[in-house]
Image (tube, coloured by chain):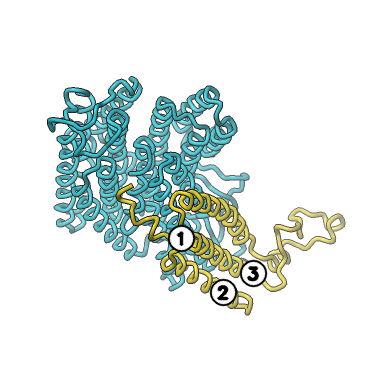
Amino acid sequence: MFNSTLIPLMVVFPLIAAILVNFLHQKDRSVKTIAIISSIVAVIIPLITLYGVHLFSGHIRTESFPEMSKLLIPDVYMGIVYSYGPLQKILLALLTVMTVFVIFLSLNRKLISGVYVAMIFISLASVSAIILADDFFNFFVFTEVLTVAQAALVIAVKETKSHKAAFKYMIFGTVSGGSILLGIALLLGIYGLLNMTDLSNAIIAGGALPPIALTAVALITVGWLYESGLFPFHIVKSNMYENATPEAAALLQLQSKFVLVAMSIALLRIFSGYTLLKSVMLGFAIFTVVIGSVMALQQTELRKLLSFVAVGQAGLVAMGIGLGTSFSISAGIFHAINDVLSMAILFFVAGYILDSYKTTKLDQLGDGLQKAPLIGLIMFLATLAISGVPPFNSYQSEFRLIQAAVQAGYAELGILIILLSIATFVAIIKAFYMIFMKPGTNVKPDLAIRGRMHKTIIVILIVMCLFIGLFPHLVYDPIYNVIVALGV
Amino acid sequence: MEPFQVGAFLTAGVLVLTGLWAIIMMDNMLKKVIGANLVGDGVNLVLIGIGYRPGGLVPEVTHHFHASAVPSTFSHFLAFNEFAELASYPLPFALVLTNIVIGASTLSVMLALSVVLYHKYNTLSVQKIFEGMEED
């Protein structure tokens, strides 16, 4: 009963916190207190929850009366199901910790808007539900809620270009949401089910996928591309990262990558026998990697550069999943976890630079190493981390991805991963040189603007990168075991 | 397939295609928003078509059966098997209801953004609003 009660709390609690802080909008002290307490509780819940399954309304598997219902399997889940295992625990622990950091930084920036903090909590609840849900109905609802919450986080910047980015994101979001729902509707029409486990069993029982089911796969894949920010939606997503506050961008890129992981696993579980899906995933992932890294190399504005790096790295995660072996999928998920940490550090550094210099245009910056040596050192370490240099975490995942590509018979993809690492390193080290080493600057920095909180969070994150790099099995092994057990 | 379902699916196809055409081809921001909404409406109609059953009972409206009924007390209720044979499938309608709520919220956000951008640029032309995006 203990675990059964706590599993839905991971979604319900942030929603309650969101409602509270929304009502207390403009009462800064109350918003701050509730936001801090709620975010700490949100971190604790996944840590103390036992692994298990939560059946909403308590319905266990029920006889399906195949002679009347025409369902292909003898028993089905009658309610919404949330599953909580080691993979979900790792993802949710990291998600909640990063959300806490972003909330703390938002409060530290005196951006104490109840609505803004509410949107952070709603996005936390949405991603938690997407990670936990074993049900397409819940999955669809929370992807839509996430789209609105993410757009609201960007709108909060109150600049025209952020409004434009949010508008584009919403238009594409409506179409992709419609695409996912139409796919779900077609599957519902054929199999009469929405539970992913049941759907997977019914598809296996039904044999080869009929043309309508193939259309459903295509439609849901379009939604997957949008939610994950993969090609051809990479521009929309990178626009969102670029126009959000750097702290919000750190959270948005994390949410997108975790949704990518959750949605990929769902697709692979349900359509496990359909090999073309993996090839399609791999194809779009390769496009995203190439375009993301090329675009990153061309940028002269730090936030834009980091946005394209984040998109390229999402392609790398999708590449691991698209290769389709247990080893590659685990390596892809492991890379998602490592990458969100490194990207978050870089976005937080961008936030520091934006606040200090009031710009992130690289040609206007310079002389940073004398003025902020700690931030310079951390950015250099984060650049090494995201480029896959040992002993940092991304080295462990990228090495596994290369191994997986070679094992799967795609040695050329291994070379592509190495090229991506080099391109990422060149793009960010160029920015590092322009900000910290280039002599002369056009703007006068205000280095007193940030408190200790910002530096502390960045240092914690770089220590986490180093820790996972030195002890990768603590994170990788549970992921691998789950993927093998799922049989995707 | 029932004639209503054929009609519903055809109409849904027209709605989705019209919506996509508006989003891709039309320059007016409000027409794009309406197009996005039409796509959602088309999908809702597909779901309604899937859930339709001629003369079917509507489980959401009232309970028509009682699983553990004592026949004398619940004589006006149908037996479970009979109910299951006659009932419409409720899941598509639950999805439609949810999508209507979500659609309303996304529509309001998109309209609010349209108002803000209109006040800034004094036009609804997407081409004019977005042409200077890089320079903003």
What is the display colour for chain B? yellow
Tell us which disc is closer to us: 2 or 3.
Answer: 2
SS for dot 3: loop
Between the C-alphas of marks 3 and 1, the distance is 25 Å
Report whether residue A202 is seen.
Answer: no
Q: Position of residue B7 (x, y in %)?
A: 60, 77
Q: Is the Cβ of the residue at disc 3 closer than 8 Å to that at disc 1?
A: no
The residue positioned farthest toward the bottom in the image shown: B3
User: In terms of sequence position, does the residue under pointer 2 or pointer 3 come before the other?
Assistant: 2
Placement of B12 over or under A264, stated as above or below:
below
In the rendered view, does A476 fall on the left or right side of A395? Answer: right
Badge 1 amino acid = Val
Q: Which residue was labeled with disc 3?
A: B52
Q: Nearer the viewer, residue B120 or B33?
A: B120
At label 3, which amino acid type do we have? Tyr
Q: Could you tell me residue A31's position as x and y percent?
A: 53, 27
Tell me the chain of label 1: A
Q: Which labelled disc corresponds to residue A175?
A: 1
Image position of B69 with respect to B25: above or below: above
Quarter of the image with the N terminus of chain A is top right
**Amino acid type at mark 2:** Thr
Asked if marks 1 and 2 fall on the same chain, the answer is no
Rendering colour (chain A)? cyan
Along the line of sight, which residue is nearer the eye, B68 or A85? A85
* Residue B11, numbered label: 2
